[in-house]
């Protein structure tokens, strides 16, 4: 029906050359075409920051709003008009610092938003201050001696707010990014797609440990629902449970076979294993990519509109005149 | 007692105040009494005055809750200054209201709650509170053991002591009904509506009310009862009594339906605006969508989102919340989206006096945003006309594609007045400024009607009208983001011109009182209307020549504002702040010396103080 070009606006893309955001916009346009919702039935909302320039580059209805408030404005769009497909573009500062409150509450309510969270662990548009996801000790313009702050881990925050969908992807991995975006769009409820993106100017190489092509296959695991958790250059590494913890094993060593490897169940209600997977960090463990959690729950806007329909089915008041007539009144 | 021997005084207008602990049910008692009077054909105006604490320590001055009703056969513009009748359920209530009783007024007290410990709680130093307050010779005191009589009345009901005592307000209401020659059948009908789902409670309340009435009737109370004729001042029609918050809510409902849109409210609880959210949350029957947001900012932002998506969207708040919303309000100005912001003003700054009334947010509403950020600002002036101004706020927002701030306040929000029920068909048309089909394929965030500078509204879902809006400055022609200097000026001017253009569709300023040859022009805005008009009319009856120009449209001002003001030799601007409207008028009308009369006590004006002020000006 639609091609990626149908979602492309006529605006010149103004991100820095080499910025990871270029890859994301391409993946997003492809994902939108794959999902197939008409551009005019698609709304893209953003806050402030480099990533929030995204709406200008998409030929949809777009609204580049104010810092941190994208989630609240998207909540208003989707709640008032559930028939629209709503995407929210946000960054680690916009979403997790100034917009933290709106973020957790939109996730808690489970509004059907597709949220793309660009995480470059830095404030780019204000020229290089540490963000809520910057690694402890990061040297930035506002932390010349290194940050002393403990960073947020977006998955932890999202799952803590009872997220029904969480996916993670890497800017340079176009295929996984597109797949995650499509899965996010298909999911009913708030879908968070954390994109690890590189800021070539202020935080170059922040994700090098996994973006490095040589070693990437050994350092990430792309999770797929219903598939065993196998990764590695030679597809011989896997994840198993060792007591309460996850452990990397090698297939063929110590009697381990593919049957021993955990199978990913993104649809599991209990978020414990999703949390464990999302929290894996190197060098001992691979970083989890792909759709980590994808469970069903009633969306906020459905609940709002169902409640209105229920009340309307029972009431005798259908319009303003009925309402006025229903009140205690007398003639003078 | 033989009815023939009861003395009856004919009165035009009477003020009665019910006062007690915040748990004594004074608000309910007052509401029932005022509705009862309205049904019997009186004009009414009410004003509840309650503490911020839900249940302050019992019997203390801080916990006193009051409800004042002004009823009459003549025009009633205000809830009245001084009470003809005060009902005081305890010594604290007496102490708080002692200065507000008219000379030879009637004081009804619960004799059971004037024990030593009660007097101590209210910080009386002697055992004679009347002497201590200097009331002994100036008022008629009727002590009635309300608590024990209520207990007797419900002796056979098997209710617990606490529930029994909670019914004593109905005993007081019964006494007052007798005093005002009000048949209690209608009050029983109201109670039926209130307690319909709790038959035991209903029975108990009806019993106590009836016993209270009969007690007064049989007691040979040596006192004149009041007779107030039906009013001849009102236009015939069907009426109800309505408070400002409910009227505001219904105005929005009417505006949405008239415009063919759905209504959306994004809001966060804040006194005294919360009842708007309560009322609209109840109105799922007419399809209202309400989001109780996580904070004030989200309240307005969800509304902006709903507006972007094609609803009539509103957010309701009070002063502190308006401060939090100011950045987002700037976005609505920049994106040129329709939005209604209701600020129910309260005492400030900061948390201030949450349950008290003030007009101190005017300059915040006009100017409290970054950048050149004009909004339409309007203000309601009676509880019932909150309906009209909420409706107009919706109409202006949708037809001029701008945020509109509607200012009301605690006095209007909680006070009630009579409201003639409207029909939707009779209300003015509302035509949202939709993008014409000719813009298909060319829609931009800056597309506007060149004559009026009004931005077109293109709602998501409409094919051929996709566009990108936002908070960055945009190129006037192309709609793309722009930092071009001349373009910015042009855009600032266009947004200002659009808001100024609203002046072409609002009514001209009118003058009341002594229109010609007045020696003084009184200027007011918003909720002070009733007090100002009463004071002006009283003065003119005494032979003075005073005119009143009262504003509901503040930005833009009515086009004849300067012409009107310059017709009079002297102007005094009266407002419940330190001079905010006067300051604003000085920037809009040159060459006039605006005198000021200001009060910032968290209370409405009294007509008496206004008359004194006017007298000083015309000496």
Image (cartoon, rainbow, N blue to C red):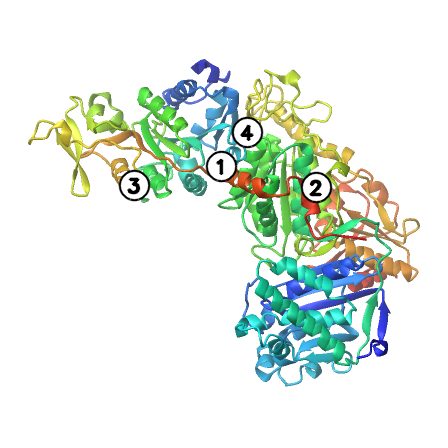
Q: Earlier in the sequence, mark 3 or mark 1?
A: 3
Question: Marks 4 and 1, Cα distance to the nearest angstrom?
Answer: 29 Å
Instruction: Quarter of the image for the N terminus of chain B: give it.
Output: bottom right
Q: Which mark is residue A301?
A: 1
Q: Secondary structure at mark 1?
A: helix
Question: Marks 3 and 4, Cα distance to the nearest angstrom?
Answer: 43 Å
Q: Which mark is residue B472?
A: 4
Q: Earlier in the sequence, mark 2 or mark 1?
A: 1
Q: Is residue B38 visible?
A: yes
Q: Are marks 2 and 1 on the same chain?
A: yes
Q: Position of residue A148 (x, y in %)?
A: 31, 44
Q: Are marks 4 and 2 in contact (CB under 8 Å)?
A: no
Q: Where is mark 3, residue-wise?
A: A270
Q: Which mark is residue A321?
A: 2
Instruction: Quarter of the image for the C terminus of chain B: give it.
Output: bottom right
| Residue at horizontal 61 percent and vertical 69 percent from the top | B204
Q: Are marks 2 and 3 in contact (CB under 8 Å)?
A: no
Left or right of B578 on screen, residue A290: left
Left or right of B322 on screen, residue B212: right
Left or right of B375 on screen, residue A183: left
| Residue at horizontal 78 percent and vertical 63 percent from the top | B609
Which residue occupies the foreground of this view, B210 or B392?
B210
Q: Position of residue B137 (x, y in %)?
A: 77, 82
Q: Position of residue A214 (x, y in %)?
A: 20, 21
């Amino acid at each position: 029906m639609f091609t990626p070009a149908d979602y492309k606006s006529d605006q010149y893309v103004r991100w820095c050359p080499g910025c990871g955001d270029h890859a994301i916009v391409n993946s997003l346009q492809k994902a939108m075409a794959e999902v197939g919702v008409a551009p005019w039935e698609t709304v893209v909302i953003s806050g402030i920051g480099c990533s929030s320039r995204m709406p200008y580059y998409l030929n949809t209805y777009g609204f580049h709003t104010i810092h941190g408030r994208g989630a609240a404005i998207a909540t208003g769009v989707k709640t008032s008009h559930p028939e629209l497909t709503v995407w929210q573009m946000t960054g680690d500062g916009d979403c997790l610092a100034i917009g933290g409150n709106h973020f957790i509450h939109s996730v808690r309510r489970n509004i059907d938003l597709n949220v793309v969270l660009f995480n470059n662990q830095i404030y780019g548009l204000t020229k290089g201050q540490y963000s809520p996801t910057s690694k402890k000790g990061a040297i930035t313009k506002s932390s010349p001696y290194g940050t002393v702050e403990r960073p947020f881990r977006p998955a932890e925050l999202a799952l803590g707010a009872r997220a029904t969908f969480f996916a993670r992807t890497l800017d340079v991995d176009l295929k996984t990014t597109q797949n995650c975006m499509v899965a996010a769009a298909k999911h009913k409820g708030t879908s968070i797609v954390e994109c690890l993106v590189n800021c070539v100017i202020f935080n170059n190489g922040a994700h090098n440990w996994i973006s490095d092509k040589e070693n990437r296959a050994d350092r990430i695991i792309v999770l797929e629902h219903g598939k065993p958790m196998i990764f590695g250059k030679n597809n011989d590494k896997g994840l198993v449970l060792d007591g309460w913890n996850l452990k990397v094993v090698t297939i063929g060593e110590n009697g381990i076979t593919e049957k021993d490897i955990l199978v990913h169940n993104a649809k599991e209600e209990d978020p414990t294993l999703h949390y464990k997977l999302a929290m894996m960090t190197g060098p001992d463990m691979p970083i989890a990519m792909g759709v980590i959690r994808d469970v069903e729950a009633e969306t906020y806007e459905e609940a709002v509109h169902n409640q209105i329909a229920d009340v309307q089915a029972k009431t005798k008041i259908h319009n303003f005149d009925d309402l006025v007539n229903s009140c205690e009144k007398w003639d003078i | 007692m033989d009815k023939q021997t009861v003395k009856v005084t004919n009165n035009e207008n009477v003020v009665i105040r019910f006062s007690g602990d915040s748990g004594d049910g004074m608000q309910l008692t007052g509401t029932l009494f005022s509705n009862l009077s309205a049904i019997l054909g009186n004009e009414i105006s009410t004003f509840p005055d309650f503490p911020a604490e839900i249940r302050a320590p019992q019997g203390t001055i801080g916990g006193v809750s009051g409800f004042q009703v002004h009823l009459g056969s003549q025009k009633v513009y205000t809830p009245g200054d001084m009470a003809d009748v005060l009902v005081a359920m305890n010594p604290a209530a007496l102490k708080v209201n002692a200065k507000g009783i008219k000379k030879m007024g009637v004081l009804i007290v619960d004799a059971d709650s004037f024990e030593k410990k009660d007097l101590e709680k209210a910080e009386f130093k002697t055992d004679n509170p009347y002497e201590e307050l200097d009331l002994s010779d100036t008022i008629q005191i009727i002590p009635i053991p309300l608590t024990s009589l209520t207990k007797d009345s419900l002796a056979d009901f098997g209710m617990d002591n606490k529930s029994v005592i909670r019914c004593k307000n109905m005993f007081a209401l019964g006494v007052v009904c007798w005093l005002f020659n009000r048949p209690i059948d209608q009050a029983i009908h109201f109670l039926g509506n209130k307690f319909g789902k709790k038959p035991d409670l209903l029975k108990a309340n009806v019993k106590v009310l009836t016993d209270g009435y009969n007690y007064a009737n049989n007691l040979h109370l040596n006192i004149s009862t009041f007779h107030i004729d039906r009013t001849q001042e009102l236009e015939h029609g069907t009426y109800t009594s309505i408070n400002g918050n409910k009227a505001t809510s219904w105005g929005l409902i009417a505006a949405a339906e008239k415009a063919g849109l759905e209504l959306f409210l994004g809001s966060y609880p804040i006194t005294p605006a919360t009842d708007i959210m309560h009322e609209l949350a109840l109105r799922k029957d007419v399809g209202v969508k309400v989001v109780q947001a996580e904070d004030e900012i989200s309240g307005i932002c969800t509304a902006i989102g709903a507006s972007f998506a094609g609803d009539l969207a509103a957010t309701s708040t009070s002063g502190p919340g308006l401060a939090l919303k100011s950045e987002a309000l700037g976005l609505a100005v920049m994106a040129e989206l329709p939005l209604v912001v209701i600020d129910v003003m309260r005492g400030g700054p900061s948390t201030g006096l949450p349950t008290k009334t003030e007009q101190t947010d005017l300059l915040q509403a006009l100017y409290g945003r970054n950048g050149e950020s004009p909004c339409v600002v309007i203000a309601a002036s009676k509880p019932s006309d909150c309906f009209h101004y909420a409706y107009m706020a919706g109409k202006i927002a949708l037809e001029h594609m701008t945020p509109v701030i509607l200012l009301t306040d605690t006095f209007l929000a909680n006070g009630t007045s009579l409201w003639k029920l409207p029909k939707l068909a009779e209300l003015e048309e509302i035509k949202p400024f939709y993008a014409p089909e000719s813009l298909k394929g060319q829609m931009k965030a800056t597309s506007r009607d060149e004559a009026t500078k009004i931005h077109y509204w293109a709602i998501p879902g409409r094919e051929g009208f996709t566009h990108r809006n936002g908070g960055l400055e945009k190129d006037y022609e192309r709609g793309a983001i722009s930092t071009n200097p001349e373009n910015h000026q042009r855009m600032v001017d266009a947004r200002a011109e659009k808001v100024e253009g609203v002046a072409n569709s609002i009514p001209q300023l009118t003058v009341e009182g002594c229109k010609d040859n007045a020696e003084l022009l009184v200027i007011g805005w918003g909720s002070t209307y009733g007090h100002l008009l009463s004071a002006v009319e009283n003065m003119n009856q005494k032979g003075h020549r005073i005119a009143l120009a009262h504003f509901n449209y503040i930005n833009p001002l009515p086009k004849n504002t300067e012409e009107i003001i310059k017709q009079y030799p002297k102007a005094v601007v009266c407002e419940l702040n330190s001079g905010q409207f006067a300051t604003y008028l000085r920037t809009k009308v040159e060459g006039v010396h605006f005198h000021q009369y200001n009060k910032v006590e968290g209370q409405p004006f009294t007509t008496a103080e206004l008359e004194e002020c006017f007298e000083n000006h015309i000496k």
